[in-house]
Image (spheres, grey):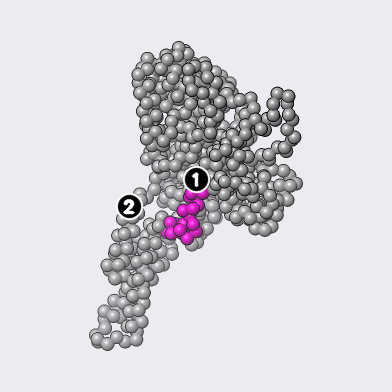
Amino acid sequence: MSEALRFELLGPQRAWYADRQIDLGPAKQRAVLAVLLLAAGRPVPSGQIVEAVWPDEAPVNGPNVVQKHVAGLRRVLEPDRSPRTPARVLTLTDAGYLLHVPPEAVDAVRFERGVRRARSAQVAGRTEEALAEVSAALELWQGEPFTGFAGPYFDAARHRLVEMRAVALETRVDLELADGRHGELVGRLVELVAEFPVRERLRHQLMLALHRSGRQAEALAAYRDYAGLLRDEYGIEPGEPLQDLHRRILRADPDLLAQAPRRPAGPGERWAGGPEPFRAPADAPARPLPTGPTESPLPPTTPPQPTAPAQPTAPAQPTAPAQPTVSAQLTVPVQVTVSAQPGGPFPPPPPGESPTGVPPWVSPPAAPLIGPVPPSRRPSGVPGWLSVVATVGGALVALLSFGMLTWLVVLLYGVWRRGWGSVVAAIYYLTVAVTFAVVVGGSETEEVSGTEGAVILIWLTTWVVGVPHVVLLNGRLLAWLRGLWRGRPYADRNRLRREYARYLLYQYPSARDDLRIGRPDLPRAYDDGGLVDVNSVPDQVIAGLPGLTRSQAQHVVVDRRMRGPYTSMEELASRCLLPAAATDALRELLIFLPPAPTPTPASTSPSGPPESSALPGRNAG
């Protein structure tokens, strides 16, 4: 039966058996199915399903709740199976629950494979075939994925799929520009720019299409609007590729009007009709973190580069060696150390692709955005204002009713969240309210007996405790209070510092030695948010890593000495047999840089001092 099942995740979540749509049941049951589909044929432990589906407040008996939803999924996915017959579509293994469906049965997998086929066709120079493949892959999208599912797990999966769709859209536009379809692209590019306002590659394509359509004034106006947006919102300038295109449009460069080549841009070449690529000096250090094959599968957006010393060829002021500056390539940040984990929302890359987990057609990570996310890209969930209104209203009901209606508020919350703990608490509040009304309200004397006094004391205590209980039912408020207790404001600040330190490492490899990123054992002035380069730090630093026991830390130290450096968190976990709890604690802290080369004595050439002293204090200050 699994061969006839089809699942849709790129939009409203739906499932089909042949031509018949399947009712997947309540929201939590659908969320459990989404987690299993994202695992791409790998078993998912019950604990990981609980963390993904109930991110704010996990049920007390989480595995039992997961088992109940799995039983419901088995009934809808295999309606003809008798209760005593073993399940064939959704089974339980030693490693967790496993969904037996072909990969092509999931539209998200078909989308990724279609983009890969388009990449192969484009590299081979088959433009029409590449355009057909990427267009067919984009037609699978019917809306934003995982609407109604909140939490870090679904946010990460949604973020990844939306980023892949944006890159695929840019690729289709590049292919159509190369085919001379600039006239019909302008309207679609205007819509894409409105949907992704800070993607510079789309702005570049819009300006190029307008210029080739004979609308130079509108192309220049598009650049002015984008530059104003970046200055007002982020305080930065457009990237060098877009500035170069602006200059070429101003001087009416005839090369922009020429037909773009039909073959894909190879290494060192420019985009179709785009600016000349940045050429690094001969002695520039190589980037330590590769992002995939040498040839770019899709025409890549030129990443921000450090400015080389300017060679004045016109009356202009010479440029000093540039300090690392933030460019305007504001794509959605992609962490270069994130890769596949068992049961996670990121399936493992096929052989030959990047070990960092970043698809090879995704542009290198840009500077971390410190600012609001555009409204069109915010993950959906319970609105904040509704959560505040419900919390305030429930607290007022519990307070003004003298605790007599606290049970109703807690019961409604328990039914909504399907939390048995809240239902039990509601029964307790109802019992106290009924007992108080019967014992105290039915008393015919003015004297308070011992029983009545005890009931009144219990009622007052329950009233006082019930109001903060109702307030703390708000999961966001509870998570915030837990964050205050554990120092989360500092954790958020350190997370931003770690993201920016990773950006510096990717764009400017010399920052590794100049700023000593990932080396807490060395004296330094730069704060990298607590990053640790697991391949370079001494043994005592590894022994102090959070989440590792003494024996696990010793295992990491010995394994590193015997078998060499690590390239990813997954390799570290597999070689040292680390549990998921340990890897989750280390994932945001560890970086995996190749070991620094052994220093060799600098040779002094007759023409001058050694190379190491050629740039004294180049990053000073």
Per the model, the C-alpha gap separating discs 1 and 2 is: 29 Å
Q: Secondary structure at mark 1?
A: helix
Residue at 67%, 45% (x, y): give it. 536
Q: Amino acid at mark 1?
A: Leu
- The residue identified by callout 1 is 496
What is the span of residues highlighted in magenta in the rendered image? 478-495
Q: Is residue 530 above or below residue 423?
A: above
* Mark 1 and mark 2 residues within 8 Å of each other at the beta carbon: no
Q: Is residue 355 magenta?
A: no
Residue 424, picture quadrant = bottom left
Residue at 61%, 39% (x, y): give it. 514
User: Residue 315 placed where, x, y %?
Assistant: 48, 17
Residue 290, picture quadrant = top right
- The residue identified by callout 2 is 386
Instruction: Classify residue 571 as left or right of residue 101.
Output: right
Residue at 39%, 33% (x, y): give it. 231
User: Residue 575 placed where, x, y %?
Assistant: 68, 47
Q: Is residue 492 magenta?
A: yes
Is disc 1 surrounded by few (<14), some (14 to 19) or many (20+) residues within 10 Å?
A: some
**34 or 529: nearer the eye?**
529
**Picture mark count:** 2
Q: Is residue 466 above or below residue 620?
A: below
Q: Amino acid at mark 2?
A: Leu
Which callout, 1 or 2, points at the residue further toward the start of the chain? 2
User: Residue 215 placed where, x, y %?
Assistant: 36, 17
Instruction: Classify residue 582 as left or right of residue 386.
Output: right
Is disc 2 surrounded by few (<14), some (14 to 19) or many (20+) residues within 10 Å?
A: few
| Res 541 seen here | yes
**286 or 553: nearer the eye?**
286
